[in-house]
Amino acid sequence: MNAGITLLKIDRYRYRIPRTGGMRTDAVIYASEKIIGQIERERAAEQAANVAWLPGIVGNSLAMPDAHWGYGFPIGGVAAFDAEEGVVSPGGVGYDINCGVRLIATNLVAGEVRAGMAELAASLFNRIPSGVGSRGMVRLSKREAEAVMREGSSWAVSKGYGTAADVEHTEARGCLPVSTLEGLSERAMERALDQLGTLGSGNHFLELQEVVEIMDVPAAEAFGLHLGQLLIMLHSGSRGFGYQVCDDFLKTFSRHGTGPEIELPDRQLACAYIQSREGGLYLSAMNAAANYAWANRQLMTHRVREGFEAHFRKSADKLGLRLVYDVAHNIAKFETHEVEGVARKLLVHRKGATRSFAPGHREVPDRYRAHGQPVLIPGDMGRASFILAGAEGAMRETFGSACHGAGRVLSRSAALKLKSGRQVADELAARGVRVFTAGIKTLAEEMPEAYKDVHDVVDAVAGAGLATRVAKMKPLMVIKG
């Protein structure tokens, strides 16, 4: 590991680790004084410095305010690499490829439907498979699974599980290019066949939320948000398929991918040159997993609409169920960014980070373009979540990136020593939050105290100019795996 790093304060929301040893650039940490200590104790700052050793890195190695220890890269890490001379690292994407968040709006006022909300949540819990090893709402043939991997959200819509508007309001329109599926193992393909349309476990969730504060009225109006509104936030990824893709390629890269000329401070940073055969196979397989994740969230969105229709005896259209946006975490994407006044094609790794494109960017849907991309920041089960809007500061400094959530401060094993799942459920109920879960142990692992306070994280992101606050929501009903 890269020991003995020096952390220098730049300003109120930025810290720098100067280039030293094998680092090819500086590392910059976005954090306030209130949370920088947590990031240091988690050794996430050290991991950000380690990332700076990788060949072809452009700009600084970056860590967001929710950063914590991860495999190789910190969770909350961002790094961009030259598309011709740089590398791709599975540790810079993570095991849960395209774990992401989507937000669904309704025209319902939370206070007016609160009496039947537990029944509604129970119906959604029964419709959407959750928990470890859960099986999906469709069983795919190998040919169908390959179509999902190539087409993403559009595959789901073509089967009647959504609308063209859903695709329009999904990052990258829910599909990244897949040139070959040659890199997929038999085990990876097997895991893709029966998990589509499943929530999963761990930090994945479906949450009914109420908008409790509007900070930017024009942006909120553009996003279709208003005070008291009932929203649905959905957080899930590529399930066992994405995990297997990551696991397979980490082994491949450890054996063959990293060239002998690449010196690494951490074996978990195993990588391959983007232009190498191994690098190309991983990128295509990773895109396939990302597309699977988008289709997965799209199928669950369909189930949400079905559940609302059955509960309220009205169509989804009349209930105003509309996808606000879907943003990916844990992904590496080719993007063009201006670096020192020159447009460059880069492979941007975002691990536990989300895209935050500024007003006017052509990849922001027309409806939102004047205000910036919706940036969805889930908190924890007991406090709050936020909707932000992408800002120009992110384009200048972080390759259009911001934080992805609150960020852990306790490991799952440490959380289990503090409270039982039943205690957590009772405490949340006392706060007015009802939880439905397939595994009571998960509640203890995911207790609010296991996370930073999302208010502090958002303060740092907004203070650094990476995004602007639009709205705040509080949790009402939570479905966990």
Image (tube, rainbow, N blue to C red):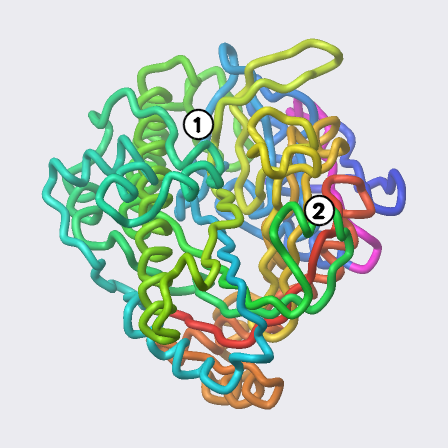
| Any part of residue 191 in sight | yes
Name above or below for residue 147 compared with residue 36: above
Classify residue 475 by image quadrant.
bottom right
Residue 142 horizontal side relative to residue 329, left or right: left
State the residue in front, 64 or 471.
471
In-front residue for pair 248/377: 377
Q: Secondary structure at mark 2?
A: helix
The amino acid sitting under disc 2 is Ala
* Residue at mark 2 to residue at mark 1: CA–CA distance: 40 Å
Q: Which residues are magenta?
A: 20-34
Q: Which residue is mark 2?
A: 219
Mark 1 packing: few (<14 Cα in 10 Å), some, or many (20+)?
A: many
Helix, strand or loop status at disc 1: loop
Q: Quadrant of the C terminus?
A: bottom left
Where residue 214 sits: x, y (%)?
74, 60
- Numbered mark located on residue 271 in the image: 1
- Residue at screen point 25% across, 47% down: 160
The 10 Å Cα crowd at callout 2, few under 14, some 14 to 19, many 20 or more, is many
Q: Main secondary structure of the magenta part?
A: loop
Report the side of 151 relative to 283 (left or right): left
N-term mark: 2 or 1 = 2
